[in-house]
Amino acid sequence: MIQKNWQELIKPNKIEFSSKKKTLTTLVAEPLERGFGLTLGNALRRVLLSSLRGAAVTAVQIDG
């Protein structure tokens, strides 16, 4: 039953990165299962905060 649930998850079919400025990158991944945007956003925020030396993440925006 658990394996069936994992196989039926909605997986993103569009993953797109765009850098408009040297200090700004936009990541679009869609569609996602309900609640996964928050989960992925939090994981990304934690990695960026702990891994970037000499720089700081000042904002993260999650739409939808």
Image (cartoon, grey):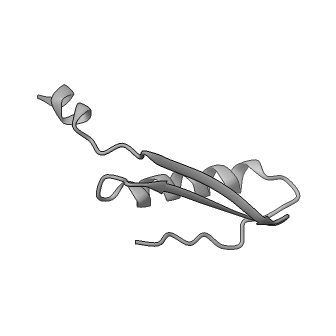
Q: Residue at x 64, y 49 (%)?
A: 47
* Left or right for 43, reference 34: right
Q: Residue at x 79, y 52 (%)?
A: 52
11 or 54: nearer the eye? 11
Quadrant into which the N terminus falls: top left
27 or 38: nearer the eye? 27
* Left or right for 58, reference 54: left
* Left or right for 59, reference 41: right
Q: Residue 24: which quarter of the image?
A: bottom right
Q: Residue at x 42, y 58 (%)?
A: 37
Q: Residue 54: which quarter of the image?
A: bottom right
* Left or right for 3, reference 48: left
Is the residue 1 above or below the residue 45 in the image? above
17 or 61: nearer the eye? 17
Q: Residue 28: which quarter of the image?
A: bottom right
Q: Residue furthest left?
A: 1
Pinpoint residue 43: horizontal percent, then vertical percent: 53, 51
Q: Residue furthest right?
A: 54
Quadrant into which the C terminus falls: bottom left
